[in-house]
Each structure stands twice: as structure tokens, then as C-alpha cells.
Image: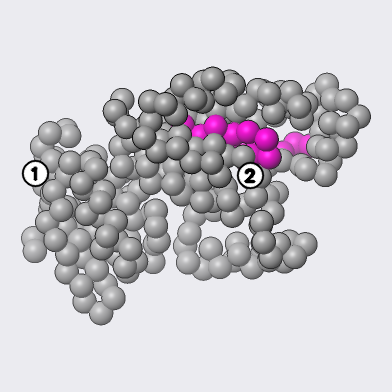
């Protein structure tokens, strides 16, 4: 999946990937896609829950040997 | 302002419980919720500067401040503290897993706009003044303030 920005969260555990995502997404323009790379499997449930709460769009995830890439599209409404 | 509020009563003064409280506070703030942490009783130690006994204290308060010196760096584990050995092991494990320290979690919470309220009744009981607390604490209030906020919120925890 094509992303406009990447956030490396390898080695970080809850709540840091979500905290860093929330900080980073503020810098994006509405409609841009952020890729978050994590090896904490909690993110598979946490990122959709975060998107549900904040109004950003959860686009899906890819998992490869413990490395999880999740994709979030910034909501134009939150700018 | 978000229309969703999270209120956390931090009653305990132990490292593990304080970490749980700040984990939730930081996550909720990242989710766009308004977060208030109300520090009361032993929980005041979490946000004390930890400079030791000072101010106008009676004998009992002075003795209590000696055996219960505040400050995020001085908190013990609620289990397996083992005179600090267990705490040391826990801190080293947290570092190994790149987990933020309690002090880092406190700074992050303040940066994310979490409100820190210290309970004035507990402060009076323990002989603490506003100067005994870290700068992140900017409100000093009672149970009515807390309940007012909690009744507007939808998540309320006692830790």
C-alpha cells in the first residue's frame, strides 16, 4: 500500500505507538496516508479502535514475520 | 474541547499503579479525550517534587514525610519490591523494552494537555503545600471539583 509518511514504532509498546501516531498525524494534511510500522501485536486491535474514536480512516494492515504495517488516512475534518 | 472526558483518581503511591494510571491518561489524551488526573492520599507522592520534609508540619506529619518521601523516582512496587531490588529489575526490564519511565510518562501527559489536580484535603492531612509539587500540577481542589468533572465524563477509574 502506498503511504505518504512512515512512522517507525519498532520496539515500542502500548501506549507509545498510539501516542506517536496521534502526534505525527497532526503534521499531515487531510487525506494523506500514514504507515505505522510496529512489532507490538496489540496495534492490530488498538489502531482500528483509535481510528474509530478520532475519526481517521483505518485502511488495513499487512503482517510479515511479526512486523505489522498499519495504514491510516487522516480525516479531512480534523484539520 | 472534546465532548468525552476521562477522570482518573490516583489514590495509590506505588510505581506500578502510577505507571498504569499514566499509560491510560496518555492513551486517552491521544484518542482526543479530555483527561483529568486527581491525585489524592498516597497518590500525592507521585507528583511531589520529593525534596523531603519542609514547610509548616506538625511532628506526626514530619515523621510521615520521612517514611513516605514523595517523588516519582522514589515510588516502590506494590509487589516484589524486595527493598528496591525488584524495582531495579523492573526498571531495567522497562528500559530494555524501550518503555518510557514514569517521569517521561508524566512529562508526556502534561504535553498532551492532561490536567493534574491535587487534593487539598490530603495535602492538609500530610502537611504539603503547593510548592511541594512538580510544575505539572496546576490545580488544587476538592472532591466536588472531581465529581463535577467525573459526572460529565464517561470513563472514571480509581487507581
The residue depicted at 68 percent of the width and 23 percent of the height is B121
Q: Which residue is mark 2?
A: B12
Q: Residues within 10 Å of mark 2 (few under 14, many from 20)?
A: many
The residue depicted at 42 percent of the width and 26 percent of the height is B151
Q: Chain of mark 1?
A: A
Q: Chain of mark 2?
A: B
Residue B51, by quadrant, is top right
Whether residue B72 sits left or right of residue A63 in the image: it is right
Q: Residue A41: horizontal and vertical position, in percent? A: 31, 67
Query: How many dots with numbers?
Result: 2
Q: Residue furthest bottom?
A: A65
The residue depicted at 24 percent of the width and 43 percent of the height is A53
Whether residue B32 sits left or right of residue B54 in the image: it is left
Whether residue B8 sits left or right of residue B48 in the image: it is left
- Locate the C terminus of chain A and report the quarter of the image it occupies: top left
Tell me, for residue B50, which label it has, or none. none
Q: Is residue B104 visible?
A: no
- Locate the N terminus of chain A and report the quarter of the image it occupies: bottom left
Judge if badges 1 and 2 mark residues of a common chain.
Answer: no
Q: Which residue is mark 1?
A: A31
Q: Is residue A66 magenta?
A: no
Q: Is residue B6 visible?
A: yes
Amino acid at each position: 500500500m502506498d503511504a505518504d509518511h512512515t512512522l517507525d514504532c519498532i520496539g515500542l509498546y502500548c501506549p507509545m505507538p498510539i501516542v506517536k501516531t496521534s502526534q505525527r498525524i497532526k503534521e499531515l494534511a487531510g487525506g494523506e496516508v500514514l504507515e505505522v510500522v510496529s512489532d507490538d501485536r496489540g496495534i492490530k486491535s488498538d489502531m482500528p479502535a483509535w481510528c474509530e474514536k478520532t475519526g481517521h480512516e483505518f485502511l488495513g494492515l499487512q503482517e510479515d514475520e511479526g512486523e505489522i504495517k498499519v495504514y491510516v488516512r487522516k480525516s479531512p475534518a480534523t484539520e | 474541547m472534546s465532548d468525552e472526558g476521562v477522570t482518573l483518581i490516583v489514590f495509590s503511591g506505588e510505581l506500578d499503579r502510577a505507571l498504569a494510571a499514566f499509560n491510560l491518561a496518555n492513551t486517552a489524551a491521544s484518542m482526543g479525550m479530555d483527561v483529568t488526573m486527581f491525585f489524592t492520599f498516597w497518590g500525592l507522592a507521585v507528583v511531589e517534587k520529593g525534596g523531603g520534609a519542609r514547610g509548616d508540619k506538625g511532628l506526626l506529619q514530619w515523621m510521615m514525610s520521612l517514611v513516605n518521601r514523595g517523588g516519582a523516582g522514589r515510588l516502590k512496587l506494590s509487589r516484589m519490591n524486595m527493598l528496591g531490588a525488584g524495582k531495579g529489575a523492573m526498571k531495567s526490564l522497562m528500559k530494555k523494552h524501550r518503555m518510557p519511565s514514569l517521569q517521561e510518562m508524566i512529562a508526556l501527559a502534561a504535553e498532551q494537555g492532561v490536567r493534574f489536580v491535587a487534593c487539598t484535603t490530603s495535602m492538609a492531612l500530610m502537611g504539603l503545600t503547593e510548592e511541594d509539587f512538580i510544575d505539572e500540577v496546576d490545580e488544587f481542589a476538592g472532591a466536588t471539583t472531581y465529581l463535577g468533572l467525573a459526572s460529565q465524563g464517561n470513563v472514571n477509574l480509581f487507581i
